Amino acid sequence: MATLTPLPLPQSFEDFCALFLLFIAYSTLGWCGEMIYCSVPKGRLCEKRGFLNGFLCPIYGHGALLVLYALRGGFRNPFLTFLFGALLTSALEYFTSWVMEKLFHMRWWDYSHYKFQINGRVCLLNSTCFGLACVVLCHVVHPWLWAHILGLGSAVIVPLASFISGIYLTDTVLSVRSAIQLSAQMGKLRELQSEIRDHIAEKREESAERRAERREEARERARALEVKARQRVLELRELEHREHHVAAHQHRVHRIGVKLRPEAQQRVIAQRALRAADAVIADGIACC
């Protein structure tokens, strides 16, 4: 497949310096693109992007050099440049995310909330943007930029690259130290978070046990009240039965009293008649 002008391998110290300036240029352009990409949706300037303290993202510089060397400057067919550029840059992004997470126990980006993504490390949207950026890089930016860097001459390239490399190395050391310190602090925070979660879990267990005990006590009280209520019902039924029995007995006594009342009246009359007869006999005897 036909390709554009490939990026030559460095053969001398001056070539290394020129390649380093190219790397710094693409890292800076990547940082600017990242800032614009993140700031436009928010409508304001977002926080500084990237791992380093300076105004550059090395992953874009490495990605640009990887694409230029792997694709030999890019294919003449823009679609092939887009396709292979997207695959290469996505692989680099995934690998960089994995390595940085293993080293510092942190993630500098997470695409888990995107619809099409792989483990939160790469996503379809960014891969598409990287593919388009590779087309612009290979077909527009790189030929112009590389020609201007080489046009500076060794009198400018070597001192400028040496000066910038000193700043870059210092920034890298400071950034790595800050990342290690931040990782240690994050580790302590994770431990504290774990302790808080364990404490909350214990409190929840204790609360659940208390609620279970209260429910059991409530059930026992309910059972006791139910037993008392049943006993009371039985007592009321027995009392009702006794009252009914007494009422029935009183009714029978009343009926018997009604039947016996005429006979008692006849006895009283007979006794009165006998007493009257006895009185008459007594008077007769007294007169004689």
Image: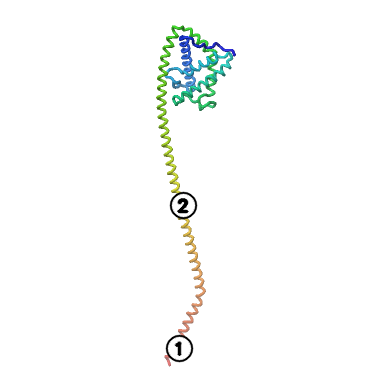
Q: Secondary structure at mark 1?
A: helix
Graded by Cα atoms within 10 Å as few (under 14), some (14 to 19) or many (20 or more), the crowding at tag 2 reads: few
The quarter of the image holding the N terminus is top right
Q: Nearer the viewer, mark 1 or mark 2?
A: 2
Indicate which disc residue 281 carries: 1
Q: Secondary structure at mark 2?
A: helix
Residue drawn at (48%, 8%) of the image: 150
User: Label 2 amino acid?
Assistant: Arg
Q: Earlier in the sequence, mark 1 or mark 2?
A: 2
For this orientation, the residue located farthest to the right is 1
Graded by Cα atoms within 10 Å as few (under 14), some (14 to 19) or many (20 or more), the crowding at tag 1 reads: few
The quarter of the image holding the C terminus is bottom left
Cα separation, mark 1 vs mark 2, equals 84 Å
Q: Is residue 270 above or below residue 288?
A: above
Residue drawn at (49%, 20%) of the image: 37
User: Label 1 amino acid?
Assistant: Ile
Residue 211: horizontal and vertical position, in percent? Answer: 44, 44
Q: Is residue 279 above or below residue 260?
A: below
Q: Name the residue that disc number 2 marks.
A: 223
* Count of numbered tags: 2
Residue 59: horizontal and vertical position, in percent? Answer: 48, 19
184 lies left or right of 116:
left
Q: Is residue 216 above or below residue 9?
A: below
Residue 222: horizontal and vertical position, in percent? Answer: 46, 51
Residue 257: horizontal and vertical position, in percent? Answer: 49, 73
For this orientation, the residue located farthest to the front is 11
In this view, the residue in front, 9 or 146, is 9
